[in-house]
Image: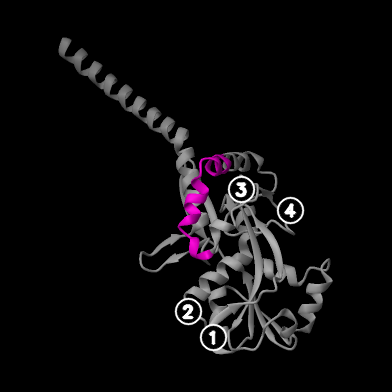
Amino acid sequence: MKKILAVMLMAIMMVTGLTACGKSSDAQKDAGGKTFTVGFDAEFPPYGFLDESTGEYVGFDLDLAAEVCKRNGWELKKQPIDWDAKDMELSSGAIDCIWNGFTINGREDQYTWSVPYVDNSQVFVVAADSGIKSKSDLAGKVVGVQKDSSALAALEDEESPENTELKASFADLIQYADYNTGFMDLEAGAIDCLALDIGVASFQISQREAGAYVMLDDKLSLEQYGVGFKLGNEELKDQVEKTLLEMAADGTVLKIAENYSDYGLTDSICIGK
């Protein structure tokens, strides 16, 4: 009888122990298991791109997101997206935010935004021997731009007659899914000029023969980058923004930017200033 009771007691203890372990595991998962999914354009260096030598997605914005996750005990998921499908990805909940050189200007009411962290410019890139020296020289030329980009928005901004008149002067405006394809066409002579973000322009020029391509002194527009969340998602925005501001205050943002100094990022950081 004692032996039977001992066996029953042991069985009860094992069941209780397994239940306790299960509850402990669930509690741990609930406590620190948040996955923070960042949507980004994988062909938008230096903010987000594929490092072909490692096969990993890297970039300034992804480094910032990784540090935010580290400080909050979150797991970072880097989710490449088609840029023209970004709103669908965000509204469906497939991603938590758009963090990839994402321009606030002109989109203020479409997303819940963090504070801006980078001042950016839209510029024109041409072949050095093209004879194009200013925006006025683009009349009658074929210009390339990324779909749903800030450069395209600037050219179509009805509140900027100068830009809309400039666009009207082009022989054609070609829209690309990504800037790598646009630069291939620029190299091939299929287009005369590419309009894009200054950081991306700096990177693309640095990857080619020295002196082969130049940025025009004339800027298309000035803008600021922020982290874009689904409209109304103030709670997540506040947490990410709080951490970003702490990172700016302790010098971490600038330290990360120094890893991308070839793109002029250190001079473009505006958060905390």
Mark 3 vs mark 4, CA separation in Å: 17 Å
Q: Secondary structure at mark 1?
A: helix
- Rendered location of residue 49, percent (x, y): 48, 64
Q: Residue at x 62, y 43 (%)?
A: 237
Where is residue 173 drawn, in percent x and y?
70, 81
In space, the residues marked 2 and 3 are separated at their CA atoms by 31 Å
Residue 107 in the figure: left or right of residue 89: right
Q: Check if mark 2's residue and mark 1's residue have beta carbons within 8 Å.
A: yes
Residue type, numbered disc 4: Glu
* 114 w.r.t. 43: above or below: above
Q: Mark 2 and mark 3 in contact? Answer it, CB < 8 Å.
A: no
Q: Which mark is residue 5?
A: none
**Is residue 185 found inside the magenta-colored segment of the image?**
no
In depth, the one of 21 and 131 nearer the eye is 131
The residue that mark 2 highlights is 208
On screen, residue 193 above or below 5: below
Q: Is residue 230 above or below residue 19?
A: below
Camera-side mark, 4 or 1: 1
Residue under pointer 4? 108
Q: Is residue 60 visible?
A: yes
Residues in magenta, as a range: 243-263
Q: Position of residue 131 (x, y in %)?
A: 65, 89
Please give the name of the residue rendered at 83% of the width and 66% of the height, measured from the top-left corner. 159
Q: Tell me, yes or no, whether the two marked residues, 3 and 4, touch with CB atoms within 8 Å.
A: no
Mark 2, secondary structure of its residue: loop
User: Nearest the camera: 251 or 179?
Assistant: 251
Question: Which mark, by number, is residue 187?
Answer: 1
Number of other residues with Cα within 10 Å of mark 4, as a class: few under 14, some 14 to 19, many 20 or more: few
Q: Amino acid at mark 2?
A: Arg
Label 2: how many residues lie within 10 Å, few (<14), some (14-19) or many (20+)? few
Q: Which mark is residue 271?
A: 3
Name the element at disc 4.
Answer: loop
